[in-house]
Image: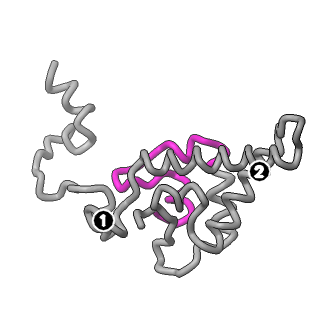
Amino acid sequence: MGRVTGSWLSGPRAAYGHQDDTDRQRWRGERLGLPESGSGAAAPTGRRALGFFIDLGLAALVAGLFTAPELPGNWSLLAWILITIVPVGFFGFTPGMAVTGIWVSRLDGAMVVGVPRALLRCLLTLLLVPAVLWNLDGRSWHDRLTGTVVLRR
């Protein structure tokens, strides 16, 4: 029973009897040429999540300033979209990302993420599923579809 359970829990290579560790990825982002730790390494999931929640809170506060004393409702969503697209498109990070020390970079080496990629990343994040499905490099579907990666500062 352990062989069957181990085969699917250990990943697809284990199912075919490949136990050689020489071709295994040792850290997130290694296949992309990213360092194991420090500046330029793949951003940890916790920092990404914290940055996201900071952005959500900031969007609610901004929307609340304009709708007070009523609740902001869907205006918070619009504020979050603007807080996400504009800063990422031009500077590579949202306010929440700045606080947590992470940023978005293009894999092709371009200096700016750009508004079209930032818009696509934002729309895919709204769907939630592309943002929470990760590969071994720590990139979610919205990163892979836009050719970006989130790195540590």
Q: Residue at coordinates 60% horizontally, 73% vertically from top-left?
A: 91
- What is the x, y in percent for residue 40? 36, 69
Query: Image quadrant for the C terminus?
Result: bottom left
Q: Which residues are magenta?
A: 125-149
User: Could you say where residue 14 lies in the image, as x and y percent from the top left?
Assistant: 19, 40
Coloration of the structure image: one colour
Residue flagged by tag 1: what amino acid is it? Gly
Q: Position of residue 106 (x, y in %)?
A: 50, 72
Determine the image quadrant of residue 86. bottom right
Quadrant in which the N terminus is drawn = top left
Q: Earlier in the sequence, mark 2 or mark 1?
A: 1
Q: Is residue 18 left or right of residue 150?
A: left
| Residue under pointer 1 | 38
Q: Which residue is mark 2?
A: 62
Residue 96 figure quarter: bottom right
Looking at this view, name the residue that lies furthest to the top: 1
- In the figure, is residue 32 to the left or right of 77? left
- Front of the two marks 2 and 1: 2
Q: Is residue 60 above or below residue 100?
A: above
| Rendered residue at 26%/62% (across/down) | 36
